[in-house]
Amino acid sequence: MTISGARIIINNKNGIIIQKKNIKKMNKESLEKMGRMRLLGMHQAFKSCIESDKSEAFTNDEMVHHLVQSEWDDRQYRSLQRGLKNANFRYSASIEQLDYSDNRGLDKNQVQRLSSCDFIKKGEDLFITGSTGTGKSFLASALGQQACLMGYKVLYANTAKLMSHLKMAKADGAHLKELSKIEKQDALILDDFGVQPFDAQSRTLLLDIIEDRHGKRSTIITAQVPVKKWHEVIGEKTIADAIMDRIVHQSIRIELYGESLRKKQKTGSVILEPLL
């Protein structure tokens, strides 16, 4: 006679068959309940153990740890995928792909410090400026995706398209909801800032965004236009002063130099980054 937990099982052939049937039934029920409770990582791990007959190799404590760890890893992965999808990055980029050629003005030590995302934690702003094709968007996207990996909420947007979207939302009475969504992002990437001049409505919307985020959330801006000319790009002096006063004084700045990566590609040079 063998004691298994609180159950007493007759140690003969029929008893073993009954026990195996009961265990198979319990495992099936457990898998069904895991699926219904959306414990997807745990479900897959337990199913794999059953199918490979590895469950007996675990102690009870090891099995619990294995199932919990599998569920944790699965949720972390799905959270990351949701974050990347919601960020709506135009480009796939990573810190490891960055090119630190001497003539670019890109300091590896500074990038490594930024990749810790402490500036996002502190709600600091980052400006990346430089001529077209020097990799501004790629750098911003790489930092944005690094932030996603670290669990921060990020939103990437082409500035002109975002303003157009918000103006349409305002016409429908939904712009406050959209502004609230933007305010909640740990990092907002405004790409191609100033490529199109701001009209009166866009200026007001931009001020709303900056005001909501000032001192609380990080904003990453990429622009071909130097920061000193942003007043002209924004337009109306009072609003431009209000916006610049909130974002310029304590911002982190990177200015990229060198030839356009597009031009280098045409001449046959090796390009480590996409042409952004």
Image: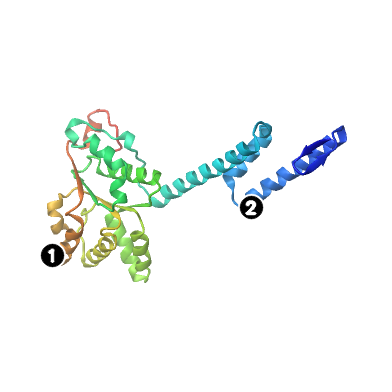
- For the C terminus, the image quarter is top left
Mark 2–mark 1 distance (CA, rounded to whole Å): 58 Å
Q: Where is residue 25 in the image (x, y as percent from the top left)?
A: 76, 44
Q: Provide the residue designation for mark 2.
A: 36
What residue type is disc 1 on? Lys
Q: Which of marks 2 and 1 is nearer the N terminus?
A: 2
Q: How crowded is mark 2: few (under 14 residues within 10 Å), some or many (20 or more)?
A: few
Q: Disc 2 on helix, strand or loop?
A: helix
Using the image, determine if residue 43 lies above or below residue 100.
Answer: below
Q: Look at discs 2 and 1 and give the one toward the viewer.
A: 2
Residue at 30% across, 37% down: 274
Residue at 37% across, 61% down: 181
Q: Quick check: 107 left or right of 69?
A: left
Q: Disc 1 on helix, strand or loop?
A: helix
Q: Residues within 10 Å of mark 1 (few under 14, many from 20)?
A: few
Q: Quick check: 240 left or right of 87?
A: left
User: Residue 237: which disc?
Assistant: 1
- The reply to whether residue 201 is visible in this rendering is yes
Q: In which quarter of the image is residue 265?
A: top left
Q: Quadrant of residue 26?
A: top right
What residue type is disc 2 on? Arg
